Image (spheres, rainbow, N blue to C red):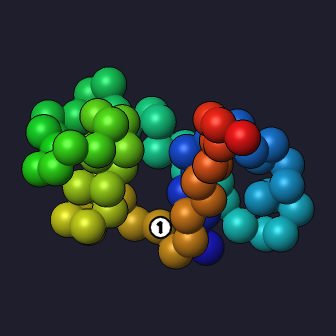
Amino acid sequence: MKVGITAIVPPEIIYSTNHTPLDLNNFVPQSNIHPKNKLCAWTGVWRELILENKIEIDKLIVQYLRTSY
Protein backbone atom coordinates (compact mmCIF):
# COMPACT_ATOMS: atom_id res chain seq x y z
CA MET A 1 0.00 0.00 0.00
CA LYS A 2 1.35 3.45 -0.92
CA VAL A 3 1.01 6.27 1.59
CA GLY A 4 1.36 9.79 0.21
CA ILE A 5 3.07 12.24 2.54
CA THR A 6 3.27 16.03 2.25
CA ALA A 7 5.09 16.87 5.46
CA ILE A 8 7.97 15.70 7.58
CA VAL A 9 6.93 12.18 8.47
CA PRO A 10 9.70 9.75 9.40
CA PRO A 11 9.56 7.08 6.66
CA GLU A 12 10.48 4.44 9.25
CA ILE A 13 7.01 4.84 10.74
CA ILE A 14 5.38 4.03 7.42
CA TYR A 15 7.83 1.23 6.58
CA SER A 16 7.18 -0.34 10.00
CA THR A 17 3.54 -0.82 8.98
CA ASN A 18 4.57 -2.62 5.76
CA HIS A 19 3.50 0.35 3.63
CA THR A 20 5.52 2.39 1.13
CA PRO A 21 5.89 6.16 1.65
CA LEU A 22 5.55 8.41 -1.40
CA ASP A 23 6.68 12.02 -0.86
CA LEU A 24 4.35 14.15 -2.98
CA ASN A 25 6.74 17.11 -2.72
CA ASN A 26 9.03 15.37 -5.21
CA PHE A 27 6.40 15.73 -7.96
CA VAL A 28 5.92 19.50 -7.72
CA PRO A 29 9.17 20.91 -9.23
CA GLN A 30 8.85 18.83 -12.41
CA SER A 31 5.09 19.14 -12.79
CA ASN A 32 3.40 20.91 -15.70
CA ILE A 33 0.15 21.13 -13.78
CA HIS A 34 -1.35 24.55 -13.10
CA PRO A 35 -3.82 24.42 -10.19
CA LYS A 36 -7.41 25.23 -11.13
CA ASN A 37 -8.22 26.91 -7.84
CA LYS A 38 -6.60 29.31 -5.41
CA LEU A 39 -4.87 26.80 -3.16
CA CYS A 40 -1.18 27.24 -2.53
CA ALA A 41 0.73 26.06 -5.61
CA TRP A 42 2.19 23.00 -3.87
CA THR A 43 -1.17 21.89 -2.45
CA GLY A 44 -2.83 22.57 -5.79
CA VAL A 45 -0.36 20.37 -7.66
CA TRP A 46 -0.79 17.50 -5.17
CA ARG A 47 -4.57 17.82 -5.46
CA GLU A 48 -4.60 17.81 -9.26
CA LEU A 49 -2.17 14.87 -9.49
CA ILE A 50 -4.31 12.81 -7.11
CA LEU A 51 -7.68 13.75 -8.64
CA GLU A 52 -6.43 13.07 -12.18
CA ASN A 53 -5.04 9.68 -11.05
CA LYS A 54 -1.50 10.62 -12.09
CA ILE A 55 -0.26 9.47 -8.68
CA GLU A 56 -1.48 6.21 -7.25
CA ILE A 57 -1.77 6.33 -3.47
CA ASP A 58 -3.99 4.48 -1.05
CA LYS A 59 -3.76 6.90 1.88
CA LEU A 60 -2.58 10.46 2.42
CA ILE A 61 -0.91 12.08 5.44
CA VAL A 62 -1.02 15.89 5.50
CA GLN A 63 0.43 18.11 8.21
CA TYR A 64 -1.80 20.91 9.45
CA LEU A 65 0.00 23.90 10.90
CA ARG A 66 -1.98 26.19 13.13
CA THR A 67 -0.81 29.75 12.59
CA SER A 68 -2.85 31.59 15.22
CA TYR A 69 -3.91 30.77 18.73
Judged left or right of residue 66, residue 23 is left
* Residue 57, percent from left and from top: 47, 67
Mark 1 Cα within 10 Å, few/some/many (few <14, many 20+)? some
Total numbered badges shown on the rendered structure: 1
Residue 3 left/right relative to 24: right
Residue at horizontal 55%, vertical 64%?
Answer: 60
Provide residue 14's location: percent of width, then percent of height.
77, 59
- The structure residue drawn at horizontal position 64% and vertical position 48%, both measured from the top left corner, is 63
Which x, y percent locates residue 44? Answer: 28, 46
Q: Which residue is mark 1?
A: 57
Q: Amino acid at mark 1?
A: Ile
- Residue shown at 80% from the left, 58% from the top: 15
In this picture, residue 45 sits left or right of residue 65: left
| 26 lies above or below 22 | above
Quadrant the N terminus occupies = bottom right
Name the secondary structure under disc 1. Answer: loop
Q: Is residue 18 above or below residue 32?
A: below
Quadrant of the drawing holding the C terminus? top right
| Location of residue 68 (image quadrant) | top right
Percent position (x, y) of residue 8?
Answer: 70, 37
